Image (cartoon, rainbow, N blue to C red):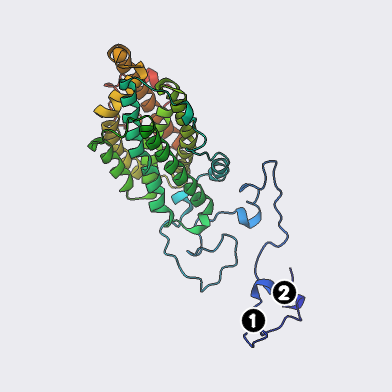
Amino acid sequence: MGGTESYPNLPDTSPVGQPLDWAWLRGARSEWGVQPKPSARGLTMMDIAVGSYGEVPERPGHRSMAPRGADVDPDTPDMGYLLNAKTDVWALNVRELYEEAVARQWSATRDIPWGELEELPSDLEHAICQLCTSLTEVEMIAADLPAKWMWRMNHDFIEAKMFLCTQIMDEARHAEVFRKRALANGGGLLKSRAGPASLLRTIIEAKTYTQATALLHLLGEGFILDLFRQGELIAPGPVEKKMFRMAMQDEARHVAYGTMHIRYAVEHDPDVADEIHEALDVGEAALFELGTSPDLGTALALLLAGGSEQVEEQGFAMQGDLLRKQVTSYLSRCERAGVPRLDRTTLPLDLLGITRDDLVGVGA
């Protein structure tokens, strides 16, 4: 694209005498002619990551809301962002996860077969209502946490901010679907106690975004993801099965982002691992308190047993199996993220009946 000489006949003033500025046409820096090609899916965020527009700086040179790649005027206001290093927020899979998220949005109103909701025995209805009460309580922390940090992120990391927007929408939908299920069959919302609050407060009060991500995605959402993966066993009917299956696909994206963000941060700044371990030391204790809470644990045991008659013989054993799967899966995530916890975890592996043989491939 040419300079001023390319457009010699442009007027300097408007018809009413106001000065005109044609800088955007005459001399703006841009990769004029760089044209992304749509893929089979359409024009994705990966497709437009071409030329300098796809280059995410390690430390952006400004803190404005200007789009990355734009010709930023030096007088553009500073937004005061606090997260100005790529290691603060980035994950190598974030563009792909964003595209997946927008392609797989679902409706808690239309996509759950509410008309197939079955009348349940009183004990099972109480149990699913208690589980949905607890899930409604804990799910929104995964919306509150990104909302707390997004406005502090440098705008050059736009793809990460966009993905977190989808996470906020996902979690709002999860809170919606679990609240609806608690009310839909005449049971209602049941007990809320102090157990969940300690974990939620630990997450929301994390000192850094990377610590918060470790607590939320590696730990909290990871445990919820494994719970949803057992939805076929937990759900008493088709409505609940669909509900858990749809929520599971969302949680898998969130955990994938968090795991890869921690990995990216540690690979580029190994000192970050220490602050992550410190956060997880505290978070594990709070999570174990939640996982062994009387309400959540007994509700899960009753659902897994299919009713109160078999809860003692089958339910508690199955609930213990679920907890062991959650812990071993968590330790595997930490390993993939570059913060091995096997020799540091505060979770009571012996009490849970987890041995080194159960953790082959995890850590040492």
Residue at image coords 44%, 51%: 88
The image quadrant of residue 307 is top left
Q: Is residue 140 visible?
A: yes
The kind of residue tagged 2 is Gly
Q: Quadrant of the C terminus?
A: top left
Is 189 situated left or right of 58 in this image? left
Q: Characterize the local packing of mark 1: few (<14), some (14-19) or many (20 or more) Cα atoms within 10 angstroms.
A: few
Q: Characterize the local packing of mark 2: few (<14), some (14-19) or many (20 or more) Cα atoms within 10 angstroms.
A: few
The kind of residue tagged 1 is Leu
Single out the mark in the foreground, 1 or 2. Answer: 1
Question: Badge 1 is on which residue?
Answer: 20
Question: Badge 2 is on which residue?
Answer: 3
Question: Looking at the picture, how far across and down is residue 275, in whole percent?
Answer: 34, 45
Per the image, label 1 sits on a secondary structure element best described as loop
The image quadrant of residue 330 is top left
Question: Looking at the picture, how far across and down is residue 69, in whole percent?
Answer: 60, 61
Q: Is residue 211 above or below residue 80?
A: above
Spatial CA distance of label 1 from label 2 is 16 Å
Q: Which mark is residue 10?
A: none
Q: Is the residue under label 2 in contact with that under label 1 (CB below 8 Å)? A: no
Q: Is residue 354 visible?
A: no
Q: Quadrant of the N terminus?
A: bottom right
Q: Is residue 102 above or below residue 362?
A: below
Is 13 situated left or right of 267 in this image? right
Sequence-first disc among 1 and 2: 2
Residue at image coords 35%, 21%: 303
Per the image, label 2 sits on a secondary structure element best described as loop
Residue at image coords 31%, 31%: 345
Q: Nearer the viewer, residue 247 or 179?
A: 179
Q: Is residue 62 above or below residue 208?
A: below
Is 199 situated left or right of 239 in this image? left
